[in-house]
Image (tube, grey):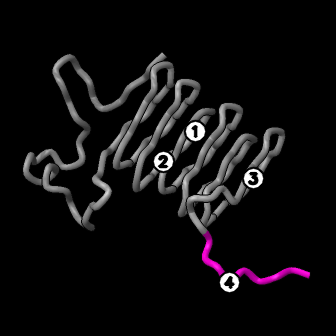
């Protein structure tokens, strides 16, 4: 009745959808991409992309290739690629990404750390050369690496 899949899972395809009106509690691990339109509480570990739709509500730490937030997320984000918070998105949590985009109208409360896609396992040269370790960026005017857009 059920055939065993012999082909590898493609992380570029959306394999899992948590639809609007659905509530999920627990940890999710996926080799393919995940789209969330419902409510999730629990950590997400994904080899592909994680997309939180406009009606998605997530209370989770997320680790994925790329993350797009159009809904509400409370948790920390780790991505090897790009983190995007769209104009309807809300993120309360810290980020670690190679690329970080915050569209006008989006809300971000937390701190961010940028690491190149090809990061080595060890300190990056800008941390050790400047002598500031993992301290947040400090600019004239009091910017401390945290931001909120309204």
Where disc 1 sits, the SS reads strand
**Do the residues bearing badges 1 and 3 touch, measured as CB atoms within 8 Å?**
no
Asked if 40 appears above or below 15 in the picture, the reply is above
Marking on residue 77: 2
Q: Which of labels 1 and 2 is toward the front?
A: 2
Considering the numbered disc 4 on the image, is that residue within a helix, a strand or a loop? loop
Is residue 133 left or right of 23 when viewed as pictured? left
Q: Which disc, if any, is residue 6?
A: 4
Circle 2 packing at 10 Å, graded few (<14), some (14-19), many (20+), is: many
Estimate the x, y position of residue 119 in percent, counting from the top left: 27, 61
Q: CA distance from mark 3 to mark 2?
A: 18 Å
Front in this rendered view, residue 4 or 63: 4
The quadrant where residue 9 appears: bottom right
Residue designated by label 1: 74
Q: Secondary structure at mark 2?
A: strand
Please determine whether, in this image, residue 144 is positioned above or below residue 3. Answer: above
Is-magenta flag for residue 3?
Answer: yes
In this view, the mark in front (4 or 3): 4
Q: Earlier in the sequence, mark 4 or mark 3?
A: 4
Spatial CA span between label 4 and label 2: 32 Å
Give the residue displayed 69% in from the left and 48% down from the top: 41
């Amino acid at each position: 009745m059920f055939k065993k899949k012999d082909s590898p899972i493609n992380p570029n395809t959306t394999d899992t959808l948590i639809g609007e009106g659905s509530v999920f509690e627990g940890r999710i691990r996926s080799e393919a991409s995940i789209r969330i339109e419902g409510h999730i509480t629990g950590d997400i570990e994904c080899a592909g992309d994680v997309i939180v739709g406009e009606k998605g509500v997530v209370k989770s730490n997320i680790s994925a290739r790329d993350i797009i937030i159009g809904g509400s997320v409370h948790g920390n984000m780790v991505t090897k690629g790009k983190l995007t918070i769209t104009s309807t998105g809300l993120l309360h949590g810290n980020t670690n990404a190679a690329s970080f985009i915050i569209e006008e109208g989006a809300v971000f409360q937390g701190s961010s750390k940028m690491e190149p896609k090809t990061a080595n396992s060890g300190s990056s040269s800008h941390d050790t050369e400047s002598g500031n370790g993992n301290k947040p960026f400090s600019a004239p005017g009091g910017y401390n690496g945290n931001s909120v857009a309204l």
